[in-house]
Each structure stands twice: as structure tokens, then as C-alpha cells.
Amino acid sequence: MRVIDAHVHLYPPEAGREPTAWALANGESHWAKLCTRRRKDGRLVQGFPTVDHLLRDMDTAGVSKAVLLGWYWENHATCVRQNTFYADCVRAHPDRLAGFASVHPAAGAAALDEVKRAHDAGLIGLGELSPHSQRVAWDDPWWIKLIGLAGELKLPVNLHVTDPKSAAYPGRIETPLVDFLRLAREFPQTKFILAHWGGGLAFDSGCRLLRNIYYDTAASPLLYGPDVWGRGLSAVPDERVLFGSDYPLILYPKTETGPGFLGVLREAKAAGLTEVQTTAVLGGNAATLFDW
């Protein structure tokens, strides 16, 4: 069975070396609030691995390929740096890595140009984006142009979605679920991947009618119990669920000291899904969506 992780994050080397200082120097306070915070026991909520470290973790867990997602950065310059870094990663490891582009709609025409540049450099989607976090209105004309351009270029768009029932945490931003449904209806030619089980939308059988919406499973163990796999696949078509870990988040802080894929893969394989469902979710659906 080919395992493809559709939701992985890496950051430019300078960010990983000194994340707090880098965030301060580059005006990325929201990223710092989410990614450099510590749990009550003093441990960081995630790691900051290098590309080589990621590849070793993939090998250990049997992950064939990873889709590198960008971030909902606060500044256009950070998006450009992230995209350049990902293009380099993909060129160096085309059989193991693919990349999505970061973009900030507030950059206007420069954001559209960056999407085209990233597409030409071999990146295959946009995201993980969060207009709510980036303080962009959903009817912002540049946001609308970006989504339209993604459809034209056949670039899937991964969007961060927060479950309205989830617990509070530093940096939590409300993301009204109705916004995502409206976007999918208004841009039927664009494919959307709603992260984190779509903030619960994947459990709503009414969403099966929107055929341009997919859901990834990123951060499942931190958000839901092991029954989430069955709940999601009983509500929406099997082919619309993509395995995603949210690496390098530490998904099992009570038993794990660093990021990895083994724990969440074990959980997925033990979820009571059929063999066909397991094969589809853990890699087959991503291979179809990205035409691999």
C-alpha cells in the first residue's frame, strides 16, 4: 500500500534554527504563537526538522510521498521565501516531495504573480491558507481573483478550518464553516481541501453533494478520538478523504517526544475501515487527486 501524507509542514532553514527570533524579525507573530508555544510541561508543541530529517521519518514509517504545505503567513515576503524553499525541496526530491504555495491576498497583483511563479516552479497547489487568520475578507476582490486563478491553473487549495466546538488554545482563530461551503459553491471549478476534517464538515452528510470539496485528517489525534475515521467515512464519500498528519506537530504528547508518522498511521489502520477504504485514504485518493 502506497502511503501519501497530504498535509506536512517544513520551514526555511533559518526559521527552524531560531524560530522565535526569526518570527520576530520577519513580523510573523501569529505563526510564533501557534508553532513555538510550549505545553504545560515545557515541551514545544512541534519540532523544526530539516528536509533530511523529514525524509528519514518518512522512511521509518513507510510514507512514500509527502505534500509540503505552506502557511498562512502575515507577509508577502515570507510567502515568497517559503515558496522558493519548497521549489528547491521538490527539485531535490521529486519522487518523495510535492509542494503547495503560500500566498497573501493583501499583496494584490503581486500575490497573483507569485502564484504563477510558484506554478511555473513546479508547486502543485495553494495552501495551507487561512483568510480569517490573514485578516482578509471573503469578498475581498484579490482573494476572489486568487481562487479563480487556482481553478484556471488546476491548483487545489488547502484551507485551514477550525472546528467551532474545539477547545481554546493560544492563537485560535474562528473560521465560520458557512464561509467554506459558500466558497465551494461559488467556485465549482476549483478543488478545495479542507484541513482537519473540515472543522467537522466531514461529519455532515449534507456536504457530500459538494463534489469539489476534499477533507484531510491533519492533527486528528489532537482534535478527535480514534472513532473520527469511521465518522468521517460514513458521512462523505471515501474518495474525498486524504490522509494528513500535520507533521511536525507532536500528535501524541503523552507518549511521543518528537514528530513522526507512525502513531497516526497505526491509529488509521486500526480504525476498522475496510481494506479498500484504508488503501484509498492513506494514499490512493491523493494519487488520484494529484494525478500521480
Image: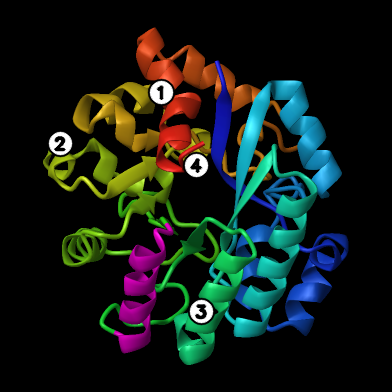
Residue 265's spot in the image, x, y percent?
57, 22
Residues in magenta, as a range: 140-155
- Marks 3 and 4, how far apart in space? 22 Å
Residue positioned most to the front: 120
Asked if labels 1 and 2 touch by Cβ distance under 8 angstroms, the answer is no
Q: Earlier in the sequence, mark 2 or mark 1?
A: 2
Residue 205 circle label: 2
| Residue located beneath label 3 in the image | 104
Q: Nearer the viewer, mark 2 or mark 1?
A: 1
Q: Quadrant of residue 77?
A: bottom right
Instruction: Please say whether residue 151 is one of the residues in the magenta stretch.
Output: yes
Instruction: Please say whether residue 123 is one of the residues in the magenta stretch.
Output: no
| Residue located beneath label 1 in the image | 280
| Residue located beneath label 4 in the image | 218
Residue at image coords 53%, 66%? 171
Q: Earlier in the sequence, mark 1 or mark 4?
A: 4
